[in-house]
Image (spheres, grey):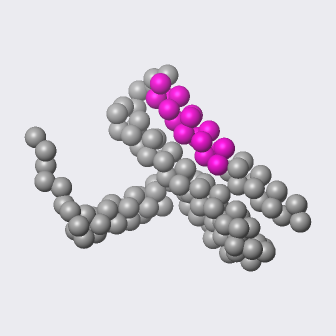
Amino acid sequence: MERDKPRGVLRVLRAFDASFKGLAGAWREEAAFRQEIAVALLAVPAGLWLGRSGVERALLVAPVLLVLVVELVNSAIEATVDRIGREQHRLAGLAKDIGSAAVLMAIVLCGVVWALVLIGR
């Protein structure tokens, strides 16, 4: 049985509401997200200031925002695994570890991009 899904403007408004709740929940529950926001509040303006062109600015800002996106996905994975059960299971641990590895890779990517853009001058 399919439920009636909202359409048009109502759908967009509900999507924004869900997104805001997700951001607020991540802020409230995830220390790593708060720390990454603090870094982003410094790095995004720095990237906009240090970039010499629109492309450089985009290259410096985009991976910073990507770290936040990947952290949100990782937090969703962790919340889902925890909701399913708190008992130790190899696959639950693996899912959390892979999500954490994705965040690490996004941070490494951010560092590499910044180094390539700024050192390559």
Residue 94 placement (x, y as % from top left): 53, 28
Give the number of callouts: 0
Magenta stretch: helix, strand or loop mostly: helix
Q: Is residue 49 magenta?
A: no
Nearer to the camera, 13 or 74: 13
Q: Is residue 42 visible?
A: no
Q: Residue at x 74, y 77 (%)?
A: 49
Q: Residue at x 19, y 60 (%)?
A: 6
Residue 114 image-quadrant placement: bottom right
Say above or below: 50 vs 25.
Answer: below
Query: In the displayed structure, does residue 93 sit left or right of residue 52?
Result: left
The segment highlighted magenta reads: 91-106
| Residue at the limit of the structure toward the bottom, as seen here | 49
Q: Residue at x 34, y 33 (%)?
A: 84
Residue 24 placement (x, y as % from top left): 42, 63
Query: In the displayed structure, does residue 11 sit left or right of residue 54?
Result: left
Nearer to the camera, 87 or 45: 45
Residue 66 placement (x, y as % from top left): 59, 56
Q: Residue at x 66, y 44 (%)?
A: 105
Query: In the displayed structure, does residue 36 sit left or right of residue 6?
Result: right
Say above or below: 121 vs 92.
Answer: below
Nearer to the camera, 116 or 32: 116
Say above or below: 117 vs 93.
Answer: below
Residue 39 placement (x, y as % from top left): 66, 64
Say above or below: 50 vs 19.
Answer: below
